[in-house]
Image: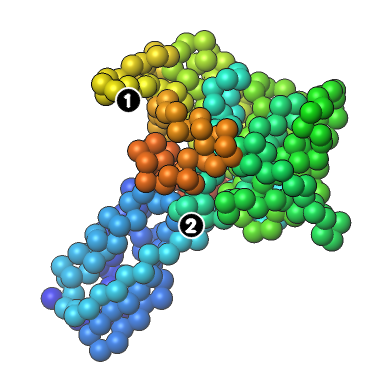
Amino acid sequence: MKSLNQQNVLEALKIVKDPDLHKDIVTLQFVKNIIIDDNNLKLDIELTTPACPVKEELKAESEKAIRSTIEVNKIEINMTSNVTSRQVAARAPILPGVKNTIAVASGKGGVGKSTVAVNLAVALKNSGAKVGVVDCDIYGPSIPLMFDIKEKPQMHNQKLMPIEKYGIKVMSIGFLVDPMQAVIWRGPMASGAVKQFLTDVDWGELDYLIFDFPPGTGDIQLTIVQQIPLTGAVIVTTPQEISLADARKGLVMFNKVNVPILGIIENMSYYICSHCGERENIFDFGGGERAATQMKVPFLGEIPIDIKLRIGGDKGIPLTESDIESQQSKIISKIAHNLAAQISIKNAESMNATPISISL
């Protein structure tokens, strides 16, 4: 057995690999603050996201690796995180404190995209991340209802301050217009409003800023991809072919403007009868995963139909906030973990990449 010193500890930990980044935690510079006191060891393992799904496995594997080669009494491993972002040169100056920008989109309406976006945001917040949500649907904003926000944002230093609810920073056109009035704007006006959410709002420091896109592939979507280099996009679909056909169009749009696809989420995947427990595939089965395979993008997971999810949206209390231990919340949390892992992978891949200038 080897003696306890920093070099031997680092050598021992080189066998511990991050399953997503496919490198050992020493090479990835995850190992921090090694302290040796007598024959006791303390160290930090700093991951790329607090939502890492294998955090406890990495901790256990690290202790096992050390004890297998080094004589040591007590080992104290502190698991921390520092959310990664794309290289600084690629980050938009209009969002200087935002590390990652994620579009949640769909090719068509009615797939529960906003419900997914809101609950993903809360699940990421529950993991310890700093999260914000932008409601990009100018004509039919639903985020104010889903967060039960009725007040208007305040101004500070000539900037709008996002409204904070459930630990999430939120901005929507619904905060600024009468909810009983229809927004009748041409495309350039709607796009200009979304641009203001980027330039005239003080978002502060965020790990993840989620953009709840309107359905389709129009002016608003193009405005956002022109203004900021999105970390990536998530496509929400339901299992049936009519939804998948439109989801593929959205995916192709993001590919054309050089926005990485972080994955596909299948919503309303199935229904479990509350009386008999039988599974019903109301909207077909497995379409989202098949589309992900065909398009060679990650499949982040499937969300079943559940009345509690609908009630949470109507009452303005997301299920991942009101009932974190429910089976539905656990499913969404796992999808959020998968999303965070894909963001870390994309950020690692972009470290040596040259920033791309998009002109449309």
Q: Is residue 310 left or right of residue 135?
A: left
- 55 above or below 285? below
Near-viewer residue (262 or 9): 262
- 240 above or below 76? above
Q: Which badge, 2 or 1, is on the more N-terminal residue?
A: 2
Q: Which of the 4 image quadrants contains residue 249?
A: top right
Q: Which mark is residue 274?
A: 1
Residue 321 position within the rendered picture, expressed as x and y whole percent measured from the top left: 49, 46
Residue 237 position within the rendered picture, expressed as x and y whole percent measured from the top left: 50, 22
Query: Quick one: SS at disc 2?
Result: loop
Q: Which of the 4 image quadrants contains residue 302?
A: top left
- Quadrant showing the N terminus: bottom left
Q: Which residue is mark 2?
A: 128
Residue at 61% across / 20% down in the picture? 109
Inspect this view and state whether residue 311 appears: yes
* Figure disc tally: 2
